[in-house]
Amino acid sequence: MVNLVLVSHSATLAAGLLELMRQMCADNCKIAVAAGIDDPANPIGTDAISILQAIESVYTPDGVLVLVDLGSAILSARSALDLLDPEIAPNVKISAAPLVEGAIGAVVAASGGDPLDRVEQEACLAQQAKSAQLN
């Protein structure tokens, strides 16, 4: 089964999104969080090592989709991929999907047993559904 990693600058944001995702999926999809940094005075940020550990904690050969919020989260996630075991790295993708909508689309697809490419596709299509509702 494909599992997911949430990467956000804010641990609070990630915790709220994780709560929402848990409402949308069966317990069979593992979701790891790498959010914020370990600095109580300045907790907003991302850390490549935390992302690497999150990926490794939920890794299966079916793959891992990494969902990121913005800016340095993308850079940190890319750095984490560079640090992965070369046998694992091809089964890990970083999604360009918007974090909230993408996470919901991804968790539903992953819980349904879809392969990594389809889970990523559903994450990216989630923005289209929102746009259609608003138009």
Image (cartoon, rainbow, N blue to C red):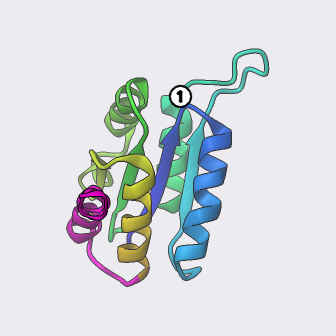
Residue sitting farthest toward the right: 40
**In which image quadrant can residue 131 be found?**
bottom left
Residue at (69, 24) in percent of width and height: 43
Looking at the image, which is closer to me, 39 or 89? 39
Residue sitting farthest toward the front: 135
**In which image quadrant can residue 17 be found?**
bottom right
Give the residue type at disc 1.
Asp
- Is 121 rendered above or below residue 66? below
Q: Horizontally, is 22 left or right of 104 in the view?
A: right
Residue at (34, 39) in percent of width and height: 81
Position of the N terminus by quadrant: bottom left
Looking at the image, which is closer to me, 37 or 11? 11
Find the magenta span and give its range.
112-135
Is residue 18 part of the magenta span, yes or no?
no
Location of residue 62 in the rendering, given as x and y in whole percent from the top left corner: 32, 71
Mark 1 crowdedness (10 Å alpha carbons): few <14, some 14-19, many ≥20 = many
Looking at the image, which is closer to me, 62 or 8? 8
Q: Is residue 41 visible?
A: yes
Is residue 122 part of the magenta span, yes or no?
yes
- Is 132 rendered above or below residue 47? below
Location of residue 42 in the rendering, given as x and y in whole percent from the top left corner: 70, 16
Location of residue 93 in the rendering, given as x and y in whole percent from the top left corner: 28, 51
The residue at which mark 1 appears reads as 47
- Is 65 rendered above or below residue 62? above
Residue at (57, 42) in percent of width and height: 34
Q: Horizontally, is 46 left or right of 133 in the view?
A: right
**Secondary structure under the numbered disc 1 in the rendered image:** loop
Question: What secondary structure is the stretch in magenta mostly built from?
Answer: helix
Residue at (35, 83) in percent of width and height: 113
- Is 101 rendered above or below residue 115? above
